DNA sequence: GATGAATGAGATTTCATTCAT
DNA sequence: CATGAATGAAATCTCATTCAT
């Protein structure tokens, strides 16, 4: 899949230059405020080259975070392999918040990524959703997480968190709160009797 | 403030025409795909008039949904008055999903609204957040909902749900799932002992 | 015809600025060497404004020379009114060469103008051709010019002269020569017998 | 010079393919409307190959018409050898119009050729101008053509005729008219006395 | 206040030309 | 030498916003 035509040397060089420039801007948080053309200037290439490599602003963002998204997905896989299912899921979700918090621009990008239905960004979202799906499925299988939800619900919540990143002053605390709610909500609920019994 | 300047007759007529046109487009789900100018054309007014009444696309959306948002907030108040706190909160959140599902375009608009930090839309979001805050506070006070979360977390989740509306085929089921998770997560968690005790 | 909508004041100002800039460039002979966008910069307006006023480079050139072309046509009319037909025609044609010689860029522009089949430039060419047609018709009517040619032939010749302006070092002399040939060729030819008889 | 490098077999084949494609397009009159790249595609070769063989659009046109231009020049030579000077000149000029009329695209090409100051096309124009110069010189020498004009004037006129080919519906008649004017203009003018004497 | 033509920054496309393979 | 992907300057279009009427 994705036969990855081996890209001519100069093309690769230009592509790298564009990615480097974009990464810098992204980390500075100015990514969505910049004219798209300017990425070409920053990278020292022509606009035609920019557009050939990255037809849209989103494609460029996705490329920059492609590795990072892959890393996140990999991390999900690692956690599945080394931790009990429920803990793996929790660790993954808290890690997502850490990431969004650590890297300027990532949160907004991931939010956009999760809301994009087509293009390269969507693929990244898809990959993440699959990783999340596996984590959830494991936890459902071993009985620690309820069976009536799937990855879609989790993605929606993550999207909501990411989208809020740059306009809620108290974001970190609120985001942690949402994850807590989510995890508690996901946990297999005690039977009513228990609650009644203890009341 | 907001002294309801008594708008000249033609001004009122133009404003209404713009709202009517926008409502139609919003319901068709094309609101964010249309050139802002075109709303003027659709309403049969000049672009200058459009801008006088609604300086931004968001302001227009907000105006269309202003009543609706007010209704939602009112509904929160009513529910607080007539139901036990936890049930009121649950009813409100489920009602939000119903609304997003019922009205094409509302979901995305509400999502945008919740993510907008300034302008008229933000006011709508603020009003909603306050209503949600009151519901949560009640439930916290009567002990049915945990005390370590606030309205911000709930708003993020609602945002995630709304933003996903028009690109997830299985949206309704997933949205319901998220609300369920959220409510279960919000509920004051039984002590571990209880669970252990019943096991 | 050409109802000349009275152009808003600022629009007129921009248009004038564009014309002034273009005139300068045209006179310097760089008109066809410049990027079209640059005319906007030189005039201190945006490209959209440039394109609205003058959709093509040719339209801009025509506008610059519109008055001049009108002047040339008027001159044809004046000459018709004040001189015997043949002399009027001769004076007009020699005057054309003078103009092409005097104004850097005009020759090439007129050549382009005469070769353009549509757009504003073509109108200018049309106007000139009509003026020439009248001059020729007069001369044919009073018997000094042969009846088997029309303005089209004269226009072709003028085009050939203009197009050669900027790449033939000896242009002026050659152009005068062509006009001489043309005028002599146009003059009603003596019957062959005469020539033979006098030989 | 022009040592006719013996061209590798595949190179010759590519060159021929390009010429064939260009000839077809030229005959269809689309030569100047086509992207230069496309000639490569039409010929089934790469753009690099196109550029190696023909560095410019003009060079390609010139190559297509090279033989033809040579033929025209040869014809001038033949006519000089077999006809009285004045008749030779007349025959040559009328033959030029025939050619322009017979071959779609040739006229415009020749016009361009005559206006080009450098490159392969210019060589073709130069060759033609020399042939014309010889014809005129002969006729001047034997007294049938006036001494005060040279080939440059004739070239300008031919250029004007060619350039007009594809946008004047009545081109053929007008072109013939121009040639008639030119020949009559070139002919040594009878003394005024003669005209008066025969009147 | 109402109007919509006018504006111009920015996005996008085209295409002659180069150059790595 | 052949190839054609890659390049980037230039051309053109889009559209949110302003402002003269």
Image (spheres, coloured by chain):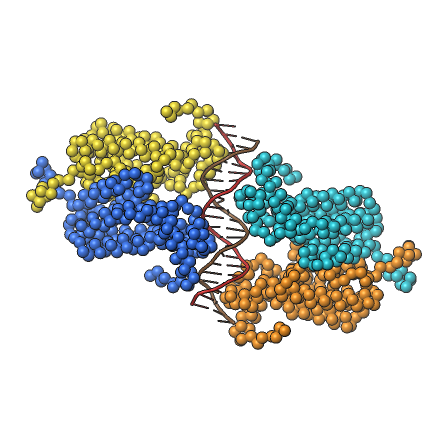
Chain colours: A blue, B yellow, C cyan, D orange, E red, F brown
Q: Where is residue B195 in the image (x, y as percent from the top left)?
A: 10, 43
Q: Nearer the viewer, residue B16 or B121?
A: B121
Q: Is residue B180 visible?
A: no
Q: Residue furthest right?
A: D197
Query: Can the viewer see residue A160 in this picture?
Result: yes
Residue C165's spot in the image, x, y percent? Answer: 69, 55
Numbered disc total: 0
- Nearer to the camera, C148 or B86: B86
Quarter holding residue D155: bottom right
The residue shown at (76%, 67%) is D135
Query: Horizontal placement of A143 versus B112: left or right?
Result: left
Name the spot of residue E6 as percent of width and height, x first.
Answer: 55, 38
Q: Which quadrant of the rendered structure holds the C terminus of chain A?
A: top left
Q: Where is residue B63 in the image (x, y as percent from the top left)?
A: 38, 32
The residue shown at (39%, 36%) is B58
B163, D141: nearer the viewer: D141
In this rendering, the answer to whether B43 lies above or below A43 is above
Residue D81 lies left or right of residue A27; in this view the side is right
User: Which residue shows up at 43% across the image and 56% down it?
Assistant: A52
Give the vertical position of D103 relative to E9 (above or below): below
| Quadrant housing residue B70 | top left
The residue at the point 81 percent across, 69 percent down is: D84
Left or right placement of residue A114 versus residue B35 in this view = left
Q: In which quarter of the image is the N terminus of chain A?
A: bottom left
């Amino acid at each position: 899949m994705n036969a990855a035509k081996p890209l001519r040397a100069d093309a690769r060089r230009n592509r790298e230059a564009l990615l480097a420039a974009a990464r810098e801007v992204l980390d500075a948080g100015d990514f969505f405020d910049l004219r798209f053309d300017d990425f070409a200037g920053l990278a020292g290439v022509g606009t035609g080259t920019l557009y050939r490599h990255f037809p849209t602003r989103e494609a460029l963002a996705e490329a920059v975070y492609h590795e990072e998204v892959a890393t996140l997905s990999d991390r999900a896989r690692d956690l599945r392999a080394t931790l009990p299912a429920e803990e793996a899921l929790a660790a993954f979700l808290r890690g997502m918040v850490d990431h969004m918090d650590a890297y300027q621009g990532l949160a907004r990008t991931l939010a956009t990524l999760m809301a994009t239905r087509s293009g390269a960004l969507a693929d990244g979202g898809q990959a993440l959703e699959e990783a999340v799906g596996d984590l959830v499925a494991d936890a459902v299988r071993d009985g620690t997480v309820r069976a009536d939800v799937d990855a879609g619900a989790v993605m929606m919540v993550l999207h909501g968190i990411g989208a809020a990143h740059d306009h809620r002053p108290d974001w970190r605390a609120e985001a942690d709160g949402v994850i807590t709610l989510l995890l508690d909500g996901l946990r297999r609920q005690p039977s009513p009797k228990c609650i009644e019994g203890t009341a």
